[in-house]
Amino acid sequence: MLQAIGLTSTPRRDRPPAVDDLTFEARPGSVTALLGPPGAGKTTALRLMLELEPGRGITYFRGRPLHRIAHPPREVGVLLGDIPGHPSRTLRGQLRMLCAATGVPVSRAEELVRTVGLTGLERRRIGTLPVGADRRLGLASALLGAPHTLLLDQPGARLSASEGAWLHELLRAHASGGGTVLYTTDDPKEAARNADRVVTLAAGRLVADQEAAEFARTRLRPRVAVRTPQAARLAAVVTQEARAARRPVEVVAEGGNLLSVYGSDCAAVGDTAFRHGVPVHRLAAETGDARPAPHGPGHTDTTSPPRPAEADDPPQASERPGDGPVAHAAGPREGRALTRRRRRTPRRPARSPLRPLRYEVHRLLGVPSTPLVLAAVLLVSVTLALLLGRGGHAALPAVLAAWPEISPLPPAAVGAGLLGAFSFGEEYRYPALTSGRGAVPRRPGLLLAKLAVAATVALALGAFVALADLAVLRLFYGGELIPVPRNWPTLSASWLGLLVGCAWAGLLGAGVFRAAAAGVAAVLAVPVAFVPLLQTVLTGPSVRSAAGLPARLREFVGPRWSPELEHWLAGSLRVLGQPAGVALSLTLTGLLCAYVFTGLRRQARW
């Protein structure tokens, strides 16, 4: 059971809160509709339930608040706002990445692709999906963890009539299996037709909490829709007969040749038209929105609102021209099969420390920006290495790193920082971790996975660039002109440390400021701003020096001290003692503290 108690959003400026003291329940085994016009606070209410919106109140999911649930994707499935995911990622890649994040087998993605009717579109990129297919993808993302509760914001948006019927059949199957379904809508007729219970909001406050039958009886008005070429004449005779019989009948001209008759039925209206020889092209019983009669019963209104969509109007196309057809929607049989599979899925799988690592690898390899950045770095590095080696004046380390004096960073460091910035920046722009639950959660396991993958990519990129530059230089200028320096281990450590530091600076900068541009700015700020400042400080007069630290440690440790350890320690001190190393260390420390301070959630664990 879902229990929302006292939900109140934090007001902004002088405006009233979007949701004010909202309390209701959504029971298991039933479908609950959260109804209200645009701006009534429906989406804000869902965000408050998911702890994405600042405010008061609490929501219990089967007796536990969300931050107390060890594995949220297996308890709550969410479709909130636009479909999350990078537009360049394929549909299959998106679902497989979410499978790694949720901790379910990859076969679950293939199963849901068939269930939601996306067969044949697995290789399509998210940005090119047909109309309605993106909503199916969002529903598949919400169902990945086989959750007990579904929270869906306008799930029927941009769906045709047939697709909407399929959607509600699937939601009904989920509820029939014991699950809880809560979705928002602004269509009263759709809520009365498809929900078991209707919770009505207006201006952020609870207006009514009713069973669907009671809602339809008290909040909607049954009517008879009549289409006739003699609308004015039929309205007059129906009104005249109603007055003669003293029946409260209201006739409203909806525009053109359509009439809405309230307080009567199809048989009475049809008999009246037959007696007076009025041709009727359409006669149907409908349920319309409740509104007071403008001037009492029997009044004919010619200035009513525009005609609503009719039940027998042709459905809208479910695809863009040229996009290809959407796969056939799953019917009741597929919905029941989904319920049986959901029951067989284990509720609490063993948590693996490799789960966020697998997610991060899927995220990195699923977008075309990663190979494009790597190819650009390699091309620019090789070109600069050839130009620097041709002059013969640059030092060999600068040539192999493709680092001219006029550049603050070599191309490989810029590329590593850019990939690190994309690691968090793209997730804030295209949230994917929580299937539309908003901002990327700051989980320690996720941060460690991103740092590990960013460091690995940076190390591989640095080694590959150096080897590629060396091979090209040997090919063009010969091997005798490229001697190997004696201090190559120290130079290699400095080179790789610079790349890892830039990758981490971009990652943490994007994580703190929630934008990839901020991550790139954090990378460039090290050589442009911090290194010159530290050079001024470190080159000034000094009274103390740490140059004799290895010797003092040898005297302290005694015979167990090894010359190899002293050698590596001295090299490490030389690397860290450089202005760039000190600047990177201070920058990473500050960014990490800022990341932790701005919202590291200990209760949300990977």
Image (cartoon, helix red, strand yellow):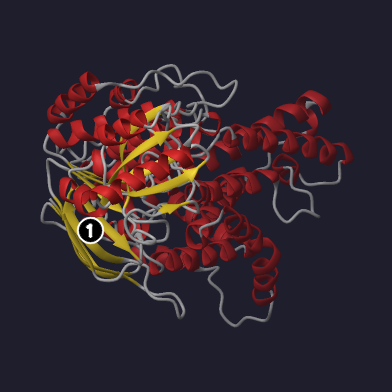
Judge whether residue 157 can be spotted in this image.
no
Observer-nearest of 535 and 245: 245
Look at the numbered disc 1 and give the secondary structure of its residue: helix
- The part of the image, by quadrant, that contains residue 135 is top left
Q: Residue at x 70, y 52 (%)?
A: 409
Q: Residue at x 81, y 35 (%)?
A: 386
Q: Is residue 583 above or below residue 348?
A: below
Observer-nearest of 467 and 592: 592
Observer-nearest of 130 and 166: 166
Q: Residues within 10 Å of mark 1 (few under 14, many from 20)?
A: some
> Picture coordinates of residue 388 (x, y %)?
83, 41
User: Disc 1 marks which residue?
Assistant: 67
> Picture coordinates of residue 224 (x, y %)?
32, 39
> Picture coordinates of residue 402 (x, y %)?
74, 42
Q: Residue at x 41, y 45 (%)?
A: 236
Q: Residue at x 25, y 64 (%)?
A: 206
Observer-nearest of 296 and 192: 296
Residue 586 relative to residue 383: left or right: left
Judge whether residue 194 can be spotted in this image.
yes
Residue 143 relative to residue 548: left or right: left
- The part of the image, by quadrant, that contains residue 381 is top right
What type is the residue that disc 1 sits on? His
